[in-house]
Image (cartoon, grey):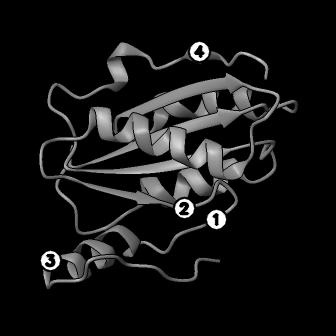
């Protein structure tokens, strides 16, 4: 089994002074054509206080321009973002999602929430708010379809 090579490209200025209450963890692999739409949709979330939402992007074995596009887009986002790049021969989407969620858990405020979606998804503007609402009224887990 090959060793994992991992780089955390998070810019210190993108990390909030306090941890977000909610973090979206996203595995990303070769999504140069779609990652911008995903980031725009997450940055446009409604009904959340500033600083409440954070984002972890776990770039998994990207061989296209995804990393360059992410690096260019992250500074303009209104939420704190961690960008982690990893190269691992045995990696797959489940592994990358697990790593993204681990990074989110390390960063998360106590008693916070981790959400996850795919890098080629465009979540609706109320996606985070609706998921948090379902959890607030007692749901143990929330799942749904995202375009």
For numbered disc 3, what is the local secondary structure? helix
Residue drawn at x 78%, y 19% is 2
For numbered disc 4, what is the local secondary structure? strand
In the rendered image, the vertical position of residue 19 relative to residue 40, given as above or below: above
How many numbered circles does the render carry?
4
* In contact (CB < 8 Å): disc 2 and disc 1: yes
Mark 3 and mark 4 lie on one chain; the one further toward the N terminus is: 4
Q: Which residue is mark 4?
A: 7
Mark 3 and mark 2 lie on one chain; the one further toward the N terminus is: 2
Q: Which residue is mark 1?
A: 121
**Quadrant of residue 138 within the rendered picture:** bottom left
Residue 102 horizontal/vertical position (percent): 42, 39
Query: Is 85 or 34 nearer to us in this picture?
Result: 85
Q: Residues within 10 Å of mark 4 (few under 14, many from 20)?
A: few
| Spatial separation of the CA atoms under disc 2 and disc 1 | 7 Å
| Spatial separation of the CA atoms under disc 3 and disc 2 | 20 Å
| Spatial separation of the CA atoms under disc 4 and disc 1 | 24 Å
Q: Residues within 10 Å of mark 2 (few under 14, many from 20)?
A: some
């Amino acid at each position: 089994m090959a060793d994992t090579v991992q780089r955390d490209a998070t810019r210190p200025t993108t990390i909030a002074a306090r941890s977000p209450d909610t973090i979206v963890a996203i595995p990303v692999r070769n999504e140069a054509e779609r990652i911008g739409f995903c980031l725009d949709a997450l940055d446009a979330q409604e009904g959340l206080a500033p600083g409440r939402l954070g984002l972890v992007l776990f770039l998994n074995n990207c061989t296209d321009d995804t990393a360059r596009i992410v690096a260019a887009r992250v500074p303009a986002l209104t939420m704190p973002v961690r960008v982690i790049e990893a190269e691992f021969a045995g990696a797959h989407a489940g592994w990358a999602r697990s790593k993204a969620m681990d990074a989110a858990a390390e960063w998360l405020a106590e008693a916070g929430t981790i959400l996850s979606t795919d890098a080629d998804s465009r979540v609706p503007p109320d996606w985070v708010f609706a998921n948090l609402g379902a959890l607030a009224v007692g749901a143990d887990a929330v799942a749904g379809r995202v375009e």
